[in-house]
């Protein structure tokens, strides 16, 4: 397993952590003195991102903050390299020395933009991160934009990620981020390999690409929760861009009909979910 040692690590709070929802798949995760930024996209409402193959998407919702508003970041976890997950603002304003954990495809493309501390992970590969007493193991989870290989070949490779937080050898919290995956059979391997997921951040939205759906609808997102079995689940990536056709209401409707014991939490842009380890 590759490892990364981060500077700092003085007094850290292990009693609780939080997830701040900025918008789309962009969140700020803070726990044990670590601050992690996911899928940084900060374009303003009304601006457009290029998704490839002649397709543009308009941002429909203003992000909750901008990069200048963020606290110091330790590392970035990125599902894949698409304009609605790593946009021009991120490319321009983020520190080029920040470690970025993602697919090999994304690391290669970001390297061309000057981001030289990329850590590519294939499915089930891990990166160990250490900062003071805090240890974070990041493991790439299965993900595909489509079950159709021909459609997949047109799109970027995708990772989900599992974040395991520990204090020295004491495991404290397990957080799963689906990434922009569809409901593929390989998701069933996740709870077999990594049971007892505390929190799932579920990418939904029903994104359309060349008339094909390439991210989970609300109903499929709830099904992914039923498969991966987190204790708590928060849908994200549901209303920010014009290519999304399955909003938060679809997810809520499916959640109400589900027999899962998972607790569903809903965040608007700018809201924070606070969690406590081992509970």
Image (tube, rainbow, N blue to C red):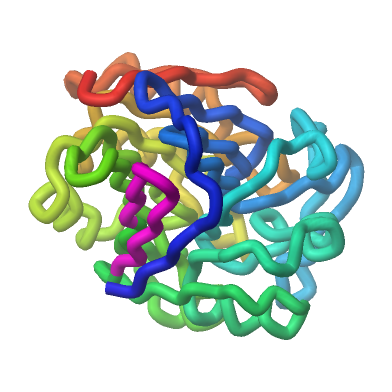
Q: Main secondary structure of the magenta part?
A: strand
229 sits left or right of 11 in the view? left
Q: Is residue 139 above or below residue 111?
A: above
Is residue 152 visible in this depiction of the protein? yes
- When asked about the image quadrant of residue 45, the answer is top right
Front residue of 132 and 186? 132
- When asked about the image quadrant of residue 114, the answer is bottom right
User: Quick one: quadrant of the N terminus?
Assistant: bottom left
Q: Horizontal and vertical percent for residue 39?
A: 60, 52
- Residue in view at x 45 percent, y 82 percent: 150
Q: Is residue 3 above or below residue 238?
A: below
Q: Horizontal and vertical percent for residue 18?
A: 48, 25
Q: Horizontal and vertical percent for residue 15?
A: 36, 20
- Residue in view at x 56 percent, y 65 percent: 100
- Residue in view at x 82 percent, y 39 percent: 66
Front residue of 9 and 18? 9
15 sits left or right of 103 in the view? left
* Magenta region: 126-137
178 part of magenta stretch:
no
- Residue in view at x 80 percent, y 34 percent: 69
């Amino acid at each position: 397993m590759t490892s990364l040692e981060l500077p700092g690590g003085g007094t850290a709070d292990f009693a609780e952590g939080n997830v701040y929802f900025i918008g789309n798949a962009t969140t700020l995760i803070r726990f044990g003195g670590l601050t992690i930024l996911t899928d940084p996209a900060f374009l303003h409402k009304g601006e457009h991102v290029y998704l490839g193959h002649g397709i543009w998407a308009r941002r429909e919702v203003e992000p909750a903050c901008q990069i200048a508003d963020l606290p110091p970041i330790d590392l970035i976890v990125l599902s894949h390299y698409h304009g609605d997950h790593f946009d021009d603002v991120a490319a321009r304003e983020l520190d080029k020395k920040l470690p970025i954990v993602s697919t090999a495809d994304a690391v290669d493309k970001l390297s061309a933009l000057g981001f030289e501390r990329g850590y590519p992970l294939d499915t089930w590969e891990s990166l160990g991160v250490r900062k003071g007493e805090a240890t974070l193991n990041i493991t790439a989870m299965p993900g595909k934009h489509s079950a159709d290989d021909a459609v997949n070949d047109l799109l970027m490779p995708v990772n989900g990620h599992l974040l395991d937080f520990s204090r020295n050898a004491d495991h404290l919290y397990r957080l799963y981020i689906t990434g922009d995956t569809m409901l593929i059979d390989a998701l069933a391997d996740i709870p077999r390999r990594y049971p007892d997921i505390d929190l799932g951040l579920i990418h939904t939205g029903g994104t359309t690409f060349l008339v094909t759906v390439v991210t989970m609808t609300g109903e499929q997102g709830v099904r992914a929760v039923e498969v991966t079995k987190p204790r708590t689940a928060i849908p994200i990536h549901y209303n920010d861009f014009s290519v999304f056709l399955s909003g938060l209401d679809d997810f809520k409707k499916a959640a109400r009909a589900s027999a899962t014991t998972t607790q569903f939490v809903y965040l608007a842009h700018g809201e924070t979910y606070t969690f406590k380890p081992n509970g």
